[in-house]
């Protein structure tokens, strides 16, 4: 048995003891970004992130995706005033409304 596999089994035992696997952790990462978690869940999450590089990468990727989505939402959000209508469409609406009156 190599030193590496010994380390992995030790980590796997600790992880099992704390009841925090990658499958348990990924939903907690998303949950923490949306709202605060109870102390116990936060500790389990921090414990797992402290020893799992894969979940740390997942956390970073999620942060990047959320930041990009927020940025896209800001750029594409139509203003309340004109709801993003083009000048041509606005002119057609005005004409149609004018025709009805
Ligand atoms: Zn993990």
Image: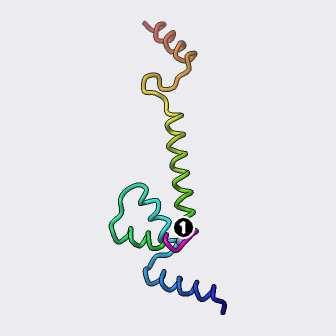
Asked if 36 appears above or below 24 in the picture, the reply is above
Residue 52 part of the magenta-drawn span: yes
**Image: magenta residue range:** 49-53
Viewport quadrant of the N terminus: bottom right
Whole-percent x, y for residue 32 in the image? 41, 60
Q: Residue furthest left?
A: 38
Dot 1 lies on which element? Answer: helix
Mark 1, other Cα within 10 Å: few <14 / some 14–19 / many ≥20? many
Residue 77 part of the magenta-drawn span: no
Whole-percent x, y for residue 25 in the image? 48, 69
**Number of numbered labels in the structure image:** 1
Question: Which is nearer the eye, 25 or 51?
Answer: 51
- For image coordinates 47% across by 22% down, the residue present is 82
Asked if 14 appears above or below 92 in the picture, the reply is below
- For image coordinates 54% across by 65% down, the residue present is 56
Asked if 70 appears above or below 40 in the picture, the reply is above
Horizontal side of residue 82 vs 3, given as left or right: left
Instruction: Locate residue 46: give its quadrant.
Output: bottom left
- For image coordinates 54% across by 40% down, the residue present is 72
Whole-percent x, y for residue 53 in the image? 57, 69
Q: Residue furthest front?
A: 3
SS assignment for the magenta stretch, majority: helix
Q: Residue furthest right?
A: 2
Residue matched to label 1: 55
- For image coordinates 41% across by 54% down, the residue present is 34
Whole-percent x, y for residue 3 in the image? 63, 88
Query: Is the CB of mark 1 within 8 Å of ligand 1?
Result: yes
């Amino acid at each position: 048995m190599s030193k590496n596999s010994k380390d992995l089994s030790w980590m796997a035992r600790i992880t099992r003891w704390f009841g925090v696997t990658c499958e348990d952790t990924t939903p907690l990462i998303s949950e923490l970004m949306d709202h605060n978690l109870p102390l116990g869940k936060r500790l389990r999450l921090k414990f797992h992130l402290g020893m799992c590089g894969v979940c740390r990468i997942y956390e970073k990727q999620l942060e990047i995706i959320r930041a990009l989505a927020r940025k896209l939402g800001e750029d594409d959000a139509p203003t309340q005033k004109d709801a993003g209508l083009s000048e041509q469409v606005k002119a057609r609406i005005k004409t149609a409304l004018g025709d009805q009156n």
